[in-house]
Amino acid sequence: MKLKGNWNFPTLIRFGAGRIKELPDACQTLGMKRPLIVTDPALAKLPIIAGAVRVLSAANMQSAVFSDMQGNPVEENVTRGVAAYQKGSHDGVIAFGGGSALDVGKAIALMVGQNRSIFDFEDREDWFTRVNVAGMAPVVAVPTTAGTGSEVGRSSVITDPRDHTKKIIFHPRMMPGLVIEDPELTVGLPPQVTAATGMDALSHCLEAYSTDYYHPLAEGIAVEGMRLIKEWLPVAVRDGSNIEARSHMLIASSMGATAFQKGLGAMHSLSHPCGANLNTHHGLTNAVVMPYVLVWNRAAIEDKMVRLAAYLGLARKSFEGVLEWVLELRKTIGIPNTLSDIGVKPEHAAAFAPQAFADLCTGGNPVKIDTPQFEKLYMNCIRGNLQL
Ligand SMILES: [Fe+2]
């Protein structure tokens, strides 16, 4: 099978090894002549960004690079990017990198034409209708990790400095107009990052599949995403240069983000306060909390897990089968077992529980969880307690 394709769902995607060379054409397709490349500081130093600037310049497109951002991006990263965009009279954004770069790039493209604060566009009620759509800039997205799926998402997660919480900034038009998915760009990712980001993709598929909302389209995408991750994530972690594994993981990541239009759940609710307060890695945190949330949700998802186990070809076609697979996968790819292994302490549980309860993902969890229960769930994750 040739792992190449042009798709127009959920947006225009040019998929296949080596397709980064189509970057100038992608920009022209969206009417850009002076793109601002938004990336993270580590990537900005690597040859792929210099290469992108060079191919754009060879096509008579003058670009600039903005990389003043951090993992778990904050409002200031976006504000500075908007200033760079305006100073350089840019006419579009190339969001190039992992989840943080993609989210900041999309948020800059949103904010270049607005008069309000970014947090006025949080994903609540109909706040997205406040956006001046005509002011939004076009975005070409180029993912370099396989996990976040932000390249096909309609939101950015940005930390609010006022209360140190992660806010989901949403507008339907934040979906990038064109995506280049080139698995060769992910070959250099070290095994730990491959593992952590891959588990973010799994958490998207698993939470989208588990949530109660009715959305069979998203559910179908989620289960095939999980099958690809089951087959190929261990291979990508073991042998980063395996293009077949990198290809399947890259599209599984986009599938996770497409599926989570259906909803997410407590894995993300627990993870967000850890990232916002302790700067833990998002995908890694989701990977750690995953089995504890599955156990917590068991009564509501038992039947679904039987179906999933059958589709994944697990030996035990049951909830236990899925749980065992998740635990085994985590061990194989080197994910720590408890939140305390990644710096979350028992005293954080009480402080983070109200933030987890207030998180937008909480509404999607198949079992209702209140603040005291979130504290207990945090303690389960911190102590490694897989019982209810
Ligand atoms: Fe996520």
Image: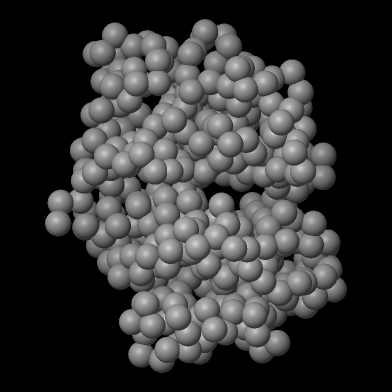
Give the camera-side residue of 93 and 211. 211
Residue 18 seen anywhere in this rendered image of the structure: yes
Percent across and percent down for residue 102 are 50, 37
Percent across and percent down for residue 294 are 59, 78
Q: Is residue 358 left or right of residue 85?
A: right
The image quadrant that residue 375 belongs to is bottom right
Q: Which quadrant is home to the C terminus? A: bottom right
Q: Which quadrant is home to the N terminus? A: bottom left
Q: Is residue 220 left or right of residue 68?
A: left
Residue drawn at (39%, 43%) of the image: 9
Percent across and percent down for residue 70 are 58, 39
The image quadrant that residue 72 belongs to is top right
The image quadrant that residue 239 belongs to is bottom left
| Count of labels in the image | 0
Residue drawn at (67%, 44%) of the image: 168
Q: Is residue 218 left or right of residue 270?
A: left
State whether residue 5 is above or below residue 367: above
User: How is the model colour-coded?
Assistant: one colour
Give the camera-side residue of 295 and 130. 130
Residue 80 seen anywhere in this rendered image of the structure: no
Percent across and percent down for residue 124 are 75, 44
State whether residue 289 is above or below residue 192: below
Residue drawn at (73%, 61%) of the image: 363
